[in-house]
Image (cartoon, coloured by chain):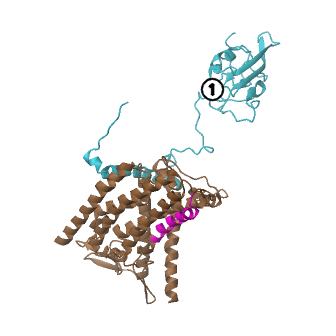
Chain colours: A cyan, B brown
């Protein structure tokens, strides 16, 4: 352990000058902020902030385009999920919160579709690996929402029907095609 | 006879109305000022019918909360003394304002009304005595709570009182020597003189070192940061750990009232009391040049509002200090009081005496 000693210099040991310095710093902040608070009341300089506070429920920060929020599954133009039940997201998920049951799709070009697709959000660690693993423009975390609290674990189990209805946060969309738009082909990567 | 009583009651109503209202507003000002100093916004959520008026409803909300909370006395404690302590805290802080002159003598309808509630011959001693008595509330609250931490807080309070009361008293001696009186209205009147004809002979001009010492010691008397050792909310919670409801509120308000009292005393002793430079009973004057006569009532009104403004300025300044400096350590406080402030106060007295003797 290193003990950091600090012996006061003669000037510091009088306290007075150091206190005056400290008071000057805080009063500078006070005068500056008060000037702009009053200016805002009079409608002047609205672009200069007088405080760093964000009045949260009324004002919100602009989320980063890479912000990982609640999941959604992108939809084809006919409204069905673009997911082809390839199991990559279920495999890559480090906390095993994704559970997919695959079924055979009538369209031979698509081959498979998820009969059920569940995300247990109580286990999700928001790492975003499922989003990166998805080869077919289906699974994204760009809704800009946080998970809502629920009274049972059932409330926190997000199913296919719910996930496909979510929309990306405007300005933060990471999918190639907006929900319900783009070509019908399920596998743009040629899988 | 009856008129005298009515006039005195009116003065009491005005002064204590001012003090209590400012104390309530100070609880708001403390939140807001600290917020502005730290680039924040501060409490602004108390909402009555959609109006927020910068959070000014917060003192009212606080009072309602305090009044409706459970009033709890520790079963092992002394119920009577436990109840007495917050009253002492409020009373000793408030009563100091009785001797502080807030204006020159008012001549109205053939009467001379001194603008001071009680014109005591021993004004300064009264202030020092009640400043010291205020610590009884700390000691009694800590002792009667039957709680180790409360007791620790009150012991610290007592130790702090002994360290600072001496420097406080000695620094006032300089003022008494400079103006030759221990009556506060004489001192305030004495500060209406001019040095070399132009510099107002305020206490801070006569006693610059005395002012710093007095102000520091008086800050220590208010038991607020940087001298909040009796409370120390981050270590021992303090002497009012076992208080709840409005009894706690009384300590809380007492602290703010003490701030105003100290601001009032500092104003009366060191910042000219109700004096405004170059404004006398005859009107505004430039020394040696000319005088603009003003009516007596207007002059008195200006002087009383000047006193109020000075008090508010010092309240602001003490909040600034409170939100700038961290707390002293216990041993630093003792060393600072005994090894630094008391010798300086003694030197101040000697130097003042020498200057008085030479001139």
Return the residue at label 1: A126
The image shows residue A109, relative to residue B289, as above or below, that is above
Q: Indicate the position of residue A17 as horizontal and vertical percent values.
A: 30, 51
Q: Chain of mark 1?
A: A
Q: Indicate the position of residue B247 as horizontal and vertical percent values.
A: 57, 61
- Stretch in magenta: B77-95
> Can residue B359 be seen from the camera position used here?
no
Answer with left or right where residue B337 lies relative to residue A129. Answer: left
Toward the viewer: B140 or B200? B140
Kindly identify the residue that appears in the image at 51 percent across and 46 percent down: A47
Toward the viewer: B5 or A88? B5
Q: How many marks?
A: 1
Q: Indicate the position of residue A131 as horizontal and vertical percent values.
A: 65, 21
The image shows residue B302, relative to residue B257, as above or below, that is below
Q: State which quarter of the image contains the C terminus of chain B.
A: bottom left
Magenta stretch: includes residue B234: no
Q: Which SS does the magenta portion mostly show? A: helix
Kindly identify the residue that appears in the image at 50 percent across and 76 percent down: B12
> Can residue A122 be seen from the camera position used here?
yes
Kindly identify the residue that appears in the image at 36 percent across and 62 percent down: B165
Toward the viewer: A8 or A80? A8
Q: Indicate the position of residue B263 as horizontal and vertical percent values.
A: 41, 64
């Amino acid at each position: 352990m290193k003990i950091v000693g600090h012996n006061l210099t003669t000037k510091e040991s009088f306290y007075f000058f150091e206190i005056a310095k400290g008071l000057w710093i805080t009063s500078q902040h006070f005068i500056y902020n008060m000037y702009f608070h009053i200016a805002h009341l009079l409608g002047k300089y609205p672009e200069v902030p007088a405080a760093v506070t964000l009045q949260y429920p009324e004002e919100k920060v602009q989320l980063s385009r890479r912000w990982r929020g609640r999941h959604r599954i992108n939809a084809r133009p006919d409204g069905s999920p673009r997911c082809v039940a390839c199991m990559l997201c279920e495999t890559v998920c480090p906390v095993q919160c994704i559970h997919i049951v695959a079924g055979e799709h009538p369209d031979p070009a698509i081959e498979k579709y998820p009969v059920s697709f569940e995300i247990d959000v109580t286990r999700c660690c928001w790492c975003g690996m499922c989003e990166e693993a998805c080869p077919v423009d289906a699974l994204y975390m760009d809704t800009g929402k946080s998970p809502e609290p629920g009274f049972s674990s059932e409330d926190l189990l997000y199913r296919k029907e719910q996930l496909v209805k979510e929309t990306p946060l405007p300005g933060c969309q990471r999918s190639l095609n907006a929900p319900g738009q783009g070509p019908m082909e399920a596998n743009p990567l040629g899988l | 006879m009856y008129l005298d009583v009515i006039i005195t009651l009116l003065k009491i109503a005005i002064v204590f109305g001012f003090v209590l209202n400012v104390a309530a507003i100070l609880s708001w000002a403390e939140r807001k000022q600290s917020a502005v100093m730290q680039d924040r916004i501060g409490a602004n959520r108390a909402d009555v019918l959609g109006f927020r008026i910068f959070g000014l409803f917060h003192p009212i909300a606080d009072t309602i909360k305090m009044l409706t909370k459970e009033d709890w006395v520790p079963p092992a404690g002394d119920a009577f003394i436990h109840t007495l302590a917050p009253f002492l805290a409020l009373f000793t802080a408030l009563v100091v304002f009785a001797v502080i002159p807030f204006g020159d003598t008012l001549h109205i309808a053939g009467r001379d009304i001194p603008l001071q509630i009680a014109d005591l011959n021993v004004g300064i001693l009264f202030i020092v005595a009640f400043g010291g008595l205020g610590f009884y509330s700390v000691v009694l609250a800590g002792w009667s709570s039957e709680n180790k931490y409360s007791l620790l807080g009150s012991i610290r309070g007592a130790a702090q009182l002994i360290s600072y009361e001496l420097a406080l008293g000695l620094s006032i001696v300089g003022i008494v020597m400079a103006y030759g009186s221990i009556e506060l209205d004489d001192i305030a009147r004495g500060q209406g003189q001019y040095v070399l004809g132009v510099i107002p002979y305020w206490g801070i001009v006569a006693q610059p070192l005395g002012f710093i010492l007095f102000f520091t010691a008086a800050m220590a008397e208010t038991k607020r940061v940087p001298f909040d050792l009796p409370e120390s909310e981050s270590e021992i919670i303090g002497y009012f750990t076992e208080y709840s409801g409005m009894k706690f509120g009384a300590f809380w308000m007492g602290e703010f009232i003490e701030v105003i009292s100290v601001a009032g005393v500092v104003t009366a002793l060191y910042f000219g009391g109700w004096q405004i430079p170059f404004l006398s009973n005859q009107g505004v004057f430039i020394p040696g040049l000319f005088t603009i006569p003003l009516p007596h009532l207007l002059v008195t009104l200006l002087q009383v509002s000047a006193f109020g403004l000075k008090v508010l300025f010092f309240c602001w300044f003490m909040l600034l200090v409170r939100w700038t400096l961290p707390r002293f350590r216990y041993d630093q406080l003792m060393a600072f009081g005994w090894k630094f402030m008391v010798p300086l106060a003694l030197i101040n007295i000697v130097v003042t005496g020498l200057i008085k003797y030479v001139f």
